[in-house]
Image (cartoon, helix red, strand yellow):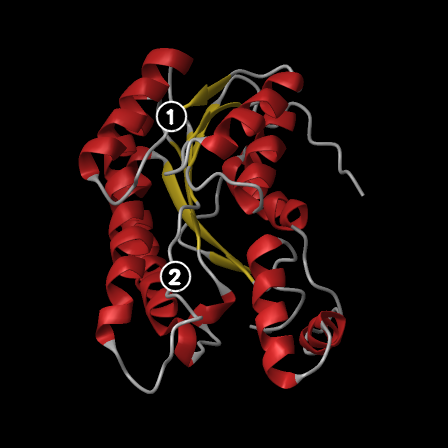
């Protein structure tokens, strides 16, 4: 079901990192439908062109800016180009992420598996936020949204570095909410559960092969653990991002919203 959101972000500019065929695309298009112009960032430039065309098809401007958020210089360039091409920044969605390769053998605690997730998910998000804060202050405020994860509460050994990096990012967002609140900059987290689509379907297929069952069986088992027996789509997660990006949440900061069909309660 498409909820009418036209006008919620009229006149505003958003940066979305980690744009690809899944959640990043849905976030960018959801913000554009609400009226925002969008700067699109990802390490790989290929998905950005298609998403930009879709944003422009909605009547909004799009800026394609390939960026590796783990590189502070590229974060600075992303923000500077956004302001140069789109005029300002009002919203930052830190959606770029990295996780351990769960195909690799795992036989116990291995901190080396944590290095890239922490570099991208934590320090990359912090670096991009640092680059955008002066522009949000100049605009009189704005919204920073961190995309975290169900794994913060339900970690699994294969993705311990991913979970740890997102847990740290959640705490960092709370600290930033305190520090940036006097400048009317809000900082919140959206914590999705399982999201149907490319990488999750690949993971389900890997589990199914190891167990000798079909993918639908695995998906149904995971969905049955939720209060709502459903696995969210990227568009459904993007609605929560829009809430934090818009004035609907103008008095909300330092919060982490679980968007996981009731897999966790409270």
Q: Which mark is residue 99?
A: 2
Image coords of residue 174 (percent x, y):
33, 56
For mark 2, give the secondary structure.
loop
Contact (Cβ within 8 Å) of mark 2 with mark 1: no
Estimate how packed mark 1 is, as few (under 14), some (14 to 19) or many (20 or more) residues with alpha carbons within 10 Å. Answer: many
Which residue is painted at 46% across and 74% down in the image? 153
Which residue is painted at 62% across and 69% down in the image? 204
Q: Is residue 30 left or right of residue 104?
A: right
Q: Is residue 247 visible?
A: yes
Residue closest to the eye, 202 or 245? 202
Q: Is residue 231 left or right of residue 98?
A: right
Residue closest to the eye, 93 or 257? 93
Which residue is painted at 33% across and 28% down in the image? 136
Estimate how packed mark 2 is, as few (under 14), some (14 to 19) or many (20 or more) residues with alpha carbons within 10 Å. Answer: many
Image coords of residue 260 (percent x, y):
61, 64
Which residue is painted at 26% across and 78% down in the image? 110
Residue closest to the eye, 38 or 262? 38
For mark 1, give the secondary structure.
loop
- Eyeballing the image, is 50 above or below 251? above
Q: What residue is shown with label 1? A: 65
Q: Is residue 169 left or right of residue 11?
A: left
Q: Which mark is residue 169?
A: none
| Quadrant the C terminus occupies | bottom right
Image coords of residue 151 (percent x, y):
46, 70
- Eyeballing the image, is 152 above or below 23? below
């Amino acid at each position: 079901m498409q909820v009418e959101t036209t006008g919620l972000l009229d006149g505003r500019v958003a940066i979305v990192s980690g744009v690809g065929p899944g959640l990043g695309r849905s976030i960018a298009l959801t913000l554009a439908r609400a009226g925002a112009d969008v700067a699109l960032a990802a390490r790989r430039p290929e998905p950005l062109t298609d998403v930009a065309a879709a944003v422009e098809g909605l009547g909004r401007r799009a800026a394609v800016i390939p960026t590796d958020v783990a590189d502070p210089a590229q974060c600075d360039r992303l923000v500077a180009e956004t302001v140069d091409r789109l005029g300002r920044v009002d919203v930052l969605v830190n959606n770029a992420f990295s996780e351990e390769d769960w195909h690799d053998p795992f036989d116990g605690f291995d901190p080396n598996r944590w290095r890239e997730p922490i570099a991208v998910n934590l320090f990359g998000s912090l670096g991009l936020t640092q680059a955008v804060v002066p522009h949000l202050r100049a605009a009189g405020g704005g919204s920073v949204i961190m995309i975290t994860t169900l794994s913060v509460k339900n970690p699994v050994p294969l993705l311990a570095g991913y979970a740890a990096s997102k847990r740290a990012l959640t705490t960092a967002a709370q600290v930033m909410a305190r520090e940036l609140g006097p400048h009317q900059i809000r900082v919140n987290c959206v914590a999705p559960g399982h999201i149907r689509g490319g990488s999750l379907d690949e993971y389900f297929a890997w589990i199914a092969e190891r167990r000798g069952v079909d993918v639908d069986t695995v998906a149904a088992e995971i969905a049955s653990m939720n209060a709502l027996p459903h696995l969210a789509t990227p568009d459904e997660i993007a609605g929560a991002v829009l809430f934090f990006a818009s004035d609907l949440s103008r008095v909300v900061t330092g919060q982490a919203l679980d968007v996981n069909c009731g897999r966790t309660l409270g």
